[in-house]
Amino acid sequence: MADYNAIIIGAGPGGYVTAIRCAQLGMKTACVDKWVNPEGQSVLGGTCLNVGCIPSKALLDSSHHYYFLQKQAAEHGIKCEGLNIDIAAMQARKQDVVKTLTQGIVGLFKKNKVATIQGTARLMGNQQIEVTAHDGSKQVVTADNIIIATGSVPTQIPVAPVDNKSIVDSTGALAFDNVPKRLGVIGAGAIGLELGSVWNRLGSQVTILEALPDFLAMADRRIAGAALKEIKKQGLDIHLGASVTAATVTNNEVTISYQDKQGEQKLVVDKLIVAVGRKPYTESLGATEIGISINERGFIQVDEHRQTTVSGIYAIGDAIGGPMLAHKASEEGVMVAERLAGQKSEMSYETVPYVIYTHPEVAFVGKTEEQLKAVGIKYKVGQFPFAASGRAKANGETNGMVRIIADANTDSILGVHIFGTSASELISEAVVAMEFEASAEDLARTIHAHPTLAEAIHEAALAVDKRAIHA
Ligand code: FAD
Ligand code: NAD
């Protein structure tokens, strides 16, 4: 008999959620993780809690308060004099948030009777896993089912080698102990925009170099256009179609050479963040040695039920590709756990929401107009600006809009795109509507509380049928 019914490798949002769900369903469960924090302590939570979603949002929130007090409080009749920043205190608060949440997982594991095994797991075949603890000691554990949730790490580019002093990755950029005067960022994706915003709000002069000619290529074009305009207005200097050819460090300065439409350019900064994506992490896991296929981009290959090419071994989250998002990783884990328990769970990738936590935020779910045009689906669009929302006006946050795309024939909602304050919260209504295959008319007939920002969704749904009331 195996030691466990299920062992999960990795305690990020994919792994720890899978472990809890397996245990809830009556499986004897263990979760192995090797993460060690800068103080040398083992911690759960993976990238998301330690160096990803949570610390970035803590800094976004702190920096937004500073930005608000500096630039917007006066409109509300609030005068702030002698405003200054204590980066050490801001960073300590961020770490405190991280500590509370990572310790929360310890509590959840105890409550659900998930065993925690600290160390690095290596697959040995025959459902055996060798775990090497931080002190070098080894143990072998066995499980009926193994779920790999080993996540991802930042992608490096040879032209800008990360030294985590002058040229940093996202982890380094979350830990600056002072505000760099001039900050360069390679990549205008989620990390570049979020961390670029944090340091811009705190006083850095930020320049972002993005290789693609389009801003936020995955997003609705109008939403991306509105976001670009606003983010630039906030002071982020964004260069599209910029291809970095070299970044060299001399005397604590980074000189970046890049090529754009105007030709060869140079930029000198005090710190450079490399934010060009993440790559799956399967190092020292021994996956291929036991027959697990890994594709040319390093992702573990899985079937529709997330089973790898070895029976009884599953993989989820960033390690298998698709959107590299915490909620996608968690839901895949839930699906695997429930299927192991004999349920028929499925996961809908069509309704995975995307959010970029700039201010205002960009959030979307479903298809864009371009995607629908490409496959010849006829659609109609309803749009509503926050400038026409009473609540947005009262809040002094009138930037942005909601766009709802519905099938021209059936009226079913195919995509919802938002640029606006609290878009990250508002998008959930659209996700629920799409999960239940709602039509724009369904949303238009749903009563929304007044005054709320969500009324903009209601109005956009009415606008699909050209009957918005307030615009
Ligand atoms: P991870 O969170 O990477 O966890 C993998 C775990 O596996 C780690 O703890 C690691 O120690 C462990 N591990 C790896 N190999 C082994 C081994 N052999 N033995 C034992 N343990 C092992 N996503 C969002 O949805 N929203 C956001 O706002 C967001 N913000 C982000 C901000 C930043 C700065 C970054 C970097 C990422 C952000 N992400 C965000 C992405 C999100 O963090 C990832 O999509 C998510 O963490 C993936 O979860 P995972 O469980 O697949 O892997
Ligand atoms: P990303 O894929 O979101 O963006 C990377 C950007 O870098 C792209 O726009 C790409 O065109 C550009 N790029 C790539 N190579 C380049 C080069 N050589 N020169 C200039 N530009 C280049 O990746 P990221 O921002 O690093 O984030 C990593 C992952 O973490 C993403 O998958 C993202 O989904 C996830 N994440 C999510 C959130 C969120 O949900 N809010 C926040 C942060 C990170």
Image (cartoon, rainbow, N blue to C red):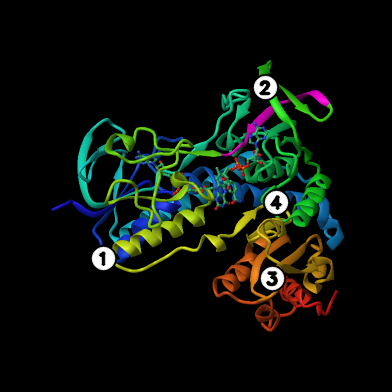
Where residue 186 sits, quadrant-wise, is: top right
Disc 2 versus disc 4: nearer the observer: 2
Q: Residue 24 vs residue 348: left or right?
A: left
Residue 30, compared with residue 380, is above or below; it is: above
- The mark that comes first in sequence, 1 or 3, is 1
Query: Which region of the structure is painted magenta?
Result: 263-277
Query: From the Cβ of disc 2, is ligand 2 less than 8 Å away?
Result: no
Give how far apart the Cα atoms at labels 1 and 4 are.
41 Å
Q: Residue at x 64, y 46 (%)?
A: 190
Disc 1 versus disc 3: nearer the observer: 3
> Is there a contact, CB below 8 Å, between mark 1 and mark 4?
no
Q: Give the amino acid at mark 3.
A: Ala
Asked if residue 414 lies in the magenta stretch, the reply is no
Callout 2: SS: strand
Residue 468 visible (yes or no) = yes
Q: Give the amino acid at mark 2.
A: Ala
- The mark that comes first in sequence, 1 or 2, is 1
> Is there a contact, CB below 8 Å, between mark 4 and mark 3?
no
Disc 4 versus disc 3: nearer the observer: 3
Q: Residue 143 vs residue 410: left or right?
A: left
Circle 1 Cα neighbour tier, 10 Å, few/some/many (<14 / 14–19 / ≥20): few
> Is there a contact, CB below 8 Å, between mark 2 and mark 3?
no
Q: Residue 276 vs residue 398: left or right?
A: left
Q: Give the amino acid at mark 4.
A: Thr
Q: Which residue is mark 3?
A: 406
The numbered mark at residue 358 is: 4
In front of the other: 188 or 207: 188
